[in-house]
Image: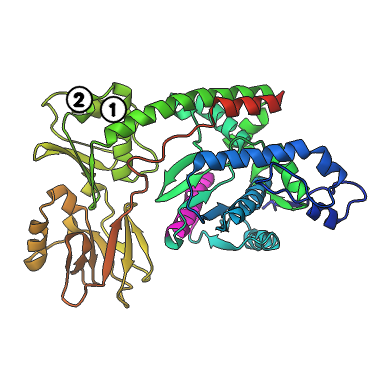
């Protein structure tokens, strides 16, 4: 297994001391002023360092507003991009008397992964940044490891943020990453919305994902980190041609990068306009706390076809809980049926059930798509069916299970009366989480306000969809930002 290479930033000159380099600290809100004993290289690259500071500050303004004293969670791998993010965020949040906490994910994929995570943690400590190490435990897949690691990483990061009240999760995606993403999506025949690539702000798993480095290049971020004398690690997977992104990275030239970024800027501007129209359409829907949507039956017929398609995808993504929404012919067939006056008879797609109900259109979780039983290993928080955040107040529930209400063999007595009193559609109540004891008997169904005598604190449930119905508006870096980047490439 290849080891990551740890790199120390180059000295600013042959005679520079470590103290000289540390003294060349850049204040992110100062427009790039170099203070203290600036070295020859720091002076020579002052314009580049100022550009990094300005690019980060502009992105944070565009991504705002933030709380008066914000708490920022930073995804830090230890590479040059994420160490630059750590430095920039540290100074930005200090100016606002807030806090920043770095999150390091130990994927456990290499023998030295744990030691490397601790090394990165020590480097962050030296920068005055507190950190937490999050570990991906359990079996790892034999194939599709990059996709699985990415999903696990975001689950760990978002889970920590939700538990600790951190609304904003900052990642170190930068300009070269954006160009690579556009190139790959072109190769995979993505539509215009996909070619907009990464948004400055996105909503994911109840967390606000912010990418404040999207207008900055990998090489200038490395120069920025070097000016601080901070070391970074190079992941050997970034040299592995088995991965598509690495092959694309090596193939892209400067002119290609410029073309990809202009394509993203153009598609992003169009997506911003469409997102506004989709948000207006989604505002006519009623999200319910039990995890379903009620909407006027004519809603999709009233909207322009592209807007209706995007809105339907958002609905299915929110309720079904998948990482990606349905596309292609199946989505088009469902949309055509929904736009047919009085002709809709009910469908399932993307883990959702779409039916008429009491003069409205109902979109809820498809009960048959829910895992029949999830065993509780310990009493900590549990994310169930990618939809509900469950918390347990009783001790001794290890070995209990969470089951969809509709799968219980018997729903009698007080529970049956509670289900009727709630007045929920049958398909909705069938998909609600029920806490069952070791014999399979129901103990609590919080969404119905029902629990067995003396077990009121057994379980709390909150609908927390993986994808928000109306996520943060897509924010491209825009033409003005692209022009600044293009000038840098000349």
* Callout count: 2
Instruction: From this view, report whether residue 216 is shown above or below residue 426.
Output: above
Q: Earlier in the sequence, mark 2 or mark 1?
A: 1
Mark 2: which secondary structure? Answer: loop
Q: How is the image coloured?
A: rainbow
Q: Which residue is pictured at 57% across the width and 33% down the height?
A: 178
**Residue 48 is at least partly visible in this image:** yes
- Would residue 257 be seen by someone viewing this image from the given angle? no
Find out whether the residues at labels 2 and 1 contact each other: C-beta distance under 8 Å. yes
Q: Which residues are magenta?
A: 139-162
Q: Residues within 10 Å of mark 2 (few under 14, many from 20)?
A: many
For the C terminus, which image quadrant? top right
Q: Which residue is mark 1?
A: 308
154 is within the stretch colored magenta = yes
Residue 386, image x and y in percent? 34, 52
Where does residue 410 sit, x and y in percent of width and height? 11, 63
Q: Is residue 194 above or below residue 466?
A: above
Residue at image mark 2: 339
Q: Position of residue 8 (x, y in %)?
A: 78, 52
């Amino acid at each position: 297994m290849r080891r990551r290479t740890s790199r120390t930033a180059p000295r600013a000159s042959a005679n520079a001391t470590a103290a000289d380099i540390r003294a060349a600290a850049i204040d992110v809100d100062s427009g790039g002023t170099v203070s203290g004993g600036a070295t020859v290289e720091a002076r020579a690259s002052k314009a580049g360092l100022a550009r990094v500071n300005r690019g980060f500050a502009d992105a944070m303004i565009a991504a705002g507003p933030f709380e008066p004293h914000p708490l920022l969670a930073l995804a830090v791998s230890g590479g040059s991009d994420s160490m630059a993010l750590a430095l920039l965020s540290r100074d930005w949040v200090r100016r606002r008397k807030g806090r920043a906490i770095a999150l390091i994910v130990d994927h456990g994929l290499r023998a030295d992964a744990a030691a490397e995570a601790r090394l990165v943690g020590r480097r962050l400590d030296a920068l005055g940044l507190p950190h937490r190490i999050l570990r991906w435990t359990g079996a790892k897949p034999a194939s599709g490891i990059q996709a699985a690691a990415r999903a696990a990483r975001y689950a760990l990061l978002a889970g920590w943020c939700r538990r600790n009240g951190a609304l904003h999760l900052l990642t170190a995606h930068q300009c070269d990453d954006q160009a690579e993403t556009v190139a790959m999506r072109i190769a995979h025949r993505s539509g215009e919305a996909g070619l907009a690539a990464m948004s400055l702000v996105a909503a994911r798993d109840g967390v606000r994902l912010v990418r404040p480095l999207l207008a900055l290049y990998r090489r200038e971020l490395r120069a920025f980190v070097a000016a601080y004398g901070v070391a970074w690690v190079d992941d050997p997977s970034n040299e592995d041609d088995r991965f598509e992104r690495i092959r694309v990275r090596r193939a892209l030239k400067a002119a290609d990068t410029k073309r990809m970024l202009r394509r993203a800027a153009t598609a992003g501007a169009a997506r911003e306009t469409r997102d506004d129209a989709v948000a207006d359409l989604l505002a006519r829907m009623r999200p319910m706390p039990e995890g379903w949507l009620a909407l006027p039956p004519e809603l999709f017929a009233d909207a322009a076809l592209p807007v209706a398609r995007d809105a339907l995808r958002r609905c299915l993504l929110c309720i079904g809980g998948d990482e990606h929404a349905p596309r292609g012919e199946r989505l088009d067939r469902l949309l055509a049926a929904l736009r047919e006056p009085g002709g809709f008879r009910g469908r399932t797609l993307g883990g959702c059930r779409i039916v008429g109900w009491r003069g409205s259109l109902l979109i809820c979780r498809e009960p048959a798509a829910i895992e029949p039983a999830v065993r509780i290993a310990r009493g900590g928080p549990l994310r169930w069916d990618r939809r509900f955040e469950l918390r347990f107040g009783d001790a001794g529930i290890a070995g209990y299970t969470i089951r969809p209400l509709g799968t219980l063999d018997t729903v009698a007595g007080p529970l049956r009366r509670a289900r009727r009193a709630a007045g929920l559609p049958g398909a909705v109540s069938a998909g609600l989480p029920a806490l069952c004891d070791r014999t399979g008997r129901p103990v609590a169904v919080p969404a119905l306000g029902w629990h067995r005598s003396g077990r009121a604190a057994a379980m709390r449930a909150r609908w927390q969809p993986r994808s928000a119905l109306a996520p943060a508006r897509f924010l491209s870096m825009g033409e003005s930002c692209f022009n600044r980047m293009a000038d840098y490439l000349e």
